[in-house]
Image (cartoon, rainbow, N blue to C red):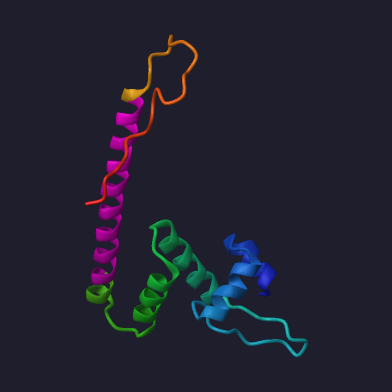
Amino acid sequence: MTVAGLSRRTGVPSDSIRYYERVGLLPKPPRTKAGYRRYGEDAVDRLQFIQGAQRLGLRLREINDLLSIRDTGTCPCGDAAVLLRDRMEEIDNEMKRLQALKSELSAMVGQLPSTDCPNPEPGVWRPPVRIAG
């Protein structure tokens, strides 16, 4: 199937398919005499794997690592588990950062004047200042 056909089958834009090919996520397919790419069912499977991994929040370099493990034909569980645990730790850290941000926003909301306040005067309310430390 052509790039356009592969795009229709998977929902992945043609430009993304070409990009994945350039960066090595998708092997270069054979070409027709006219130069058109000819993809097989293996490309559909690979793109579906890439899409699933992206939905899990994995980055392309991490997906590439998983694909490399998968392509060796050996049991990928140990290496894949390390990669996925590392990503989970990054997500935990990001969640902590976002929770701290939410707490700061909540504190700012608590410092706002009431809804029936008079017209604002300059300097009445300011966001809290963070002191580096």
Q: Residue at image x 39%, y 58%?
A: 57
Magenta stretch holds residue 86: yes
> Residue 2: horizontal and vertical position, in percent?
68, 74
Residue found farthest to the bottom: 33
Quadrant containing the N terminus in the rendered view: bottom right
> Residue 77: horizontal and vertical position, in percent?
25, 73
Q: Which quadrant of the view contains residue 86?
A: bottom left
> Residue 26: horizontal and vertical position, in percent?
52, 78
Q: Residue at image x 75%, y 90%?
A: 33
Q: Tell me if 44 is positioned left or right of 75 in this view.
A: right
> Residue 4: horizontal and vertical position, in percent?
69, 68
Magenta stretch holds residue 112: no
Q: Tell me if 95 is positioned left or right of 2 in this view.
A: left
Is 78 or 129 nearer to us in this picture? Answer: 129
Is 104 or 11 nearer to us in this picture? Answer: 104
Q: Which quadrant of the view contains residue 58?
A: bottom left
Residue found farthest to the front: 122
> Magenta region: which residues?
81-109
Q: Tell me if 83 is positioned left or right of 52 in this view.
A: left
Main secondary-structure element of the magenta-colored stretch: helix
Total numbered labels: 0
Residue 97, placed above or below residue 45: above
Is 127 or 29 nearer to us in this picture? Answer: 127
Q: Residue at image x 32%, y 41%?
A: 101
Is 81 or 131 nearer to us in this picture? Answer: 131
